[in-house]
Amino acid sequence: MVGRIITVREVQMIDSLTTAASGGVLGLFGSLLSKGMGLIDGWQMRKSQAQIFAHEIRLLELQQQYQQWHQQMQLQSQTVQASYRHDTSTGKADRWVINLLRLVRPCLTVGLILCVMVLASADQLYYQSIADALLFCCTTAITWWFGDRAMVNNSKQ
């Protein structure tokens, strides 16, 4: 068989087999390529969905923080309003009692200022913490009480 001559029919058969085989290989390659592209698309879609979900979770967290803040502000507003109602309510008392009640803030303010002045002039070290506490009370009382009046006066205008 060493010197055998291939016939035209055999050449055509080999040509047909190689054409079929190369078409099959190319078709398999195309199928694998399509599957690979589908996997990449799926991965990108999952990644995109994960980003969307992370964004939605962040939005829900921010919404929860806002709702907590809003509730705190409402509670604070209700507390301030209750404080105003208490300060302005006089009930059915005599006029001298009402006037005496209105002297509480000024007397406490003057008393705190005097305490701070006396303790600030002292040189002893153990008075420092007491002086700091009184200074805090004094500044809180003055800014709250007189600021309270400023807000009430501004709301009446």
Image (tube, rainbow, N blue to C red):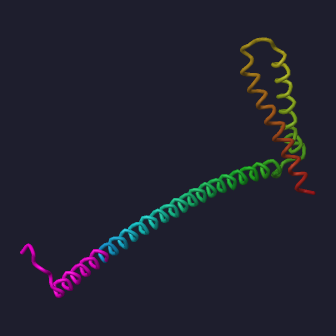
Which residue reaches farthest front?
Answer: 3
Whether residue 90 is visible to the viewer of this picture, yes or no, is no
Q: Is residue 107 above or below residue 92?
A: above
User: Where the C terminus falls, by quadrant?
Assistant: bottom right
Task: Indicate the position of residue 156 as horizontal and vertical percent values.
Answer: 90, 56
Which residue reaches farthest bottom?
Answer: 9
What residue is drawn where x is 14% and y is 81%? 6
What residue is drawn where x is 75% and y is 50%? 80
Is 97 situated left or right of 31 in this image?
right
Is 66 situated left or right of 89 in this image?
left
Which residue reaches farthest left?
Answer: 1
Q: Is residue 95 above or below residue 48?
A: above
Q: Is residue 20 above or below residue 56?
A: below
- Front residue of 28/47: it is 28
- Front residue of 126/46: it is 46
Whether residue 98 is visible to the viewer of this picture, yes or no, is yes
Task: Indicate the position of residue 21 as horizontal and vertical percent values.
Answer: 24, 77
Q: Which residues are magenta?
A: 1-26
Main SS category, magenta section: helix
What residue is drawn where x is 74% and y is 18%? 128
Badge count = 0
Task: Indicate the position of residue 74 as horizontal and vertical percent values.
Answer: 69, 56
